[in-house]
Amino acid sequence: EVQLQASGGGLVQPGGSLRLSCAASGFTFDNYAVGWFRQAPGKKREGVSCISVSDDSTFRADSVKGRFTISSDNAKNTVSLQMTDLKPEDTAVYYCAAFPARDPTDWRISYYCNDWTRYVSWGQGTLVTVSS
């Protein structure tokens, strides 16, 4: 069974940092895209950052460029999101999700990790609150 476990949320002051982790069980991230999404109260869920683990290609939304960094640790089968210079508008429930980054019928075809509609496996959320 494919499972994702997100952790690392908490309360932090503006300008502070947090590191979120997404751990996988039941599969390995090797040929998957892993993404971090967030949903603030009253707002739609949005894709924040993602990585294609097979080639380490990454994407970050404009709102987090220069502040958030995504990385993978294949040995631990985890993907982390390092968040720095946090702002109150970063407050949200953060989710990690994954999908097979290569077409199952033709492995020569790969998909960009920021194709947000392809994510099919989801972890539970972790709350990040940025407040003084």
Image (spheres, grey):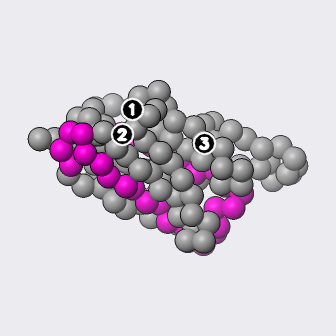
Q: Residues within 10 Å of mark 3 (few under 14, many from 20)?
A: some
Residue 16, magenta (yes or no): yes
User: Mark 3 to mark 2: distance in Å?
Assistant: 20 Å
In the figure, is residue 55 to the left or right of 65? right
Of circles 1 and 3, the one toward us is 3
Q: In the rendered view, does 129 fall on the left or right side of 95? A: left
- Element under disc 1: loop
The residue where tag 3 is placed is: 58
- Most prominent secondary structure in the magenta stretch? strand
- Give amino acid for label 2: Gln
The amino acid pointed to by label 1 is Lys
Task: Tell me the tag on residue 39.
Answer: 2
Which of the two residues, 127 or 62, is positioned nearer the viewer here?
Answer: 62
Question: The N terminus lies in which quarter of the figure?
Answer: bottom right
Residue at 51% x, 48% y is 70
Q: Which residue is drawn at 69% across and 61% down?
A: 30
Q: How far apart are marks 1 and 2 (CA)?
A: 6 Å
Crowding at label 2, few (<14), some or many (≥20) Cα neighbours within 10 Å? some
Residue occupying the point 66% across, 50% down: 56
Q: Element under label 2?
A: strand
Rendered residue at 85%/51% (across/down)? 107
Residue for badge 1:
44
Above or below, 120 relative to 66: below
Residue 68 appears in the rendering: yes
Q: Residue furthest top?
A: 62
Residue stretch in magenta? 12-39
